Image (cartoon, rainbow, N blue to C red):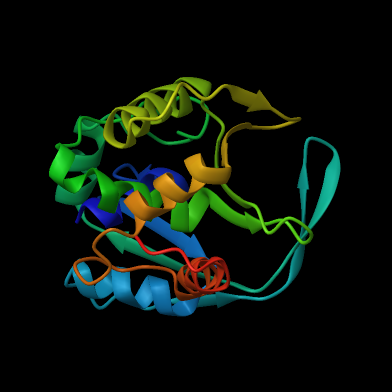
Amino acid sequence: MAYVLGFIYADGAVEDCRKSSRTCYLCLSNNDLDILRDILWVMSTKQTIVIRGPRVMKIDDREYWCKTNYYVRIGNKVIYDDLTKLGLCPRKSLVIELPEIPNEFFSYFLRGYFDSDGCIHIENIRRRLKIIFTSGSRSFLEKLGTYIGRLVSERHVPIYTNRRSFQLSYGGNCAKNVAALIYQDIVSAPYLKYKYEKYTNYLSTKKVTV
């Protein structure tokens, strides 16, 4: 469930609709149908996944093209209450804080967050690996970076700012160590297949073992 929590912190939303429908909701969306199916299986729920076709979204007076993605809405007051106790709230993206995660579960939480709001990039010429985490909350990324550094014995990594979010970016050997942490136990929690395959392909070309 730590993986699911990490995924929710990145790409989930909670809604309190008790005034209109007498319940609360957890909403999840992603471009990958299989990962949502895996998450629903872990959560032991059979909610219907809705397909949302390509569309244009307007944010801050700018238009963005959105690819086909998948969406599920789970009505459950207990889940809502548990998540709000951890600090999640409606419109959370700018204010989330890293919850307390025991060390033995942190890699699963990190993978869940990475699969939703993370990026793996391999430079074309030097074949240098980069691992990037994105959030609207600078404080969340600062604490995430501190926790990662403690587990993989890496130095402090600065937070970068772009127009609408913040990024925590690792490169080179540091990125290899973070990726190894993300995927250290691949059988015990879900994972986004295309990101994992990109990582394993990188390892095979670099002849690196973890």
Instruction: Between residue 196 and residue 137, name the one nearer to us.
Output: 196
Residue 129 percent across, percent down from the top left = 60, 53
Which residue is at a point 46% across and 20% down the rendered structure image? 139
State the residue at coordinates (19%, 36%).
Answer: 101
Q: Residue at x 45, y 33 (%)?
A: 92
- Which residue: 39% across, 30% down? 144
Q: Position of residue 206 (x, y in %)?
A: 55, 66
Q: How many marks?
A: 0
Check the picture and name the quadrant holding the N terminus. bottom left
Let me know if residue 7 appears in the view.
Answer: no
Residue at the extreme front:
207
Give the image quarter of residue 171: top right
Q: Vertical placement of 86 versus 17: above or below?
A: above
Q: Does 156 sit left or right of 99 as displayed?
A: right
Q: Quadrant of the C terminus?
A: bottom left
Picture coordinates of residue 11 (x, y %)? 47, 51
Lateral position of residue 195 relative to residue 166, left or right: left
Q: Position of residue 145 (x, y in %)?
A: 42, 29
Of residue 173 and residue 94, the one placed in the foreground of this image is 173
Question: Would residue 6 be seen by someone viewing this image from the given angle?
Answer: yes
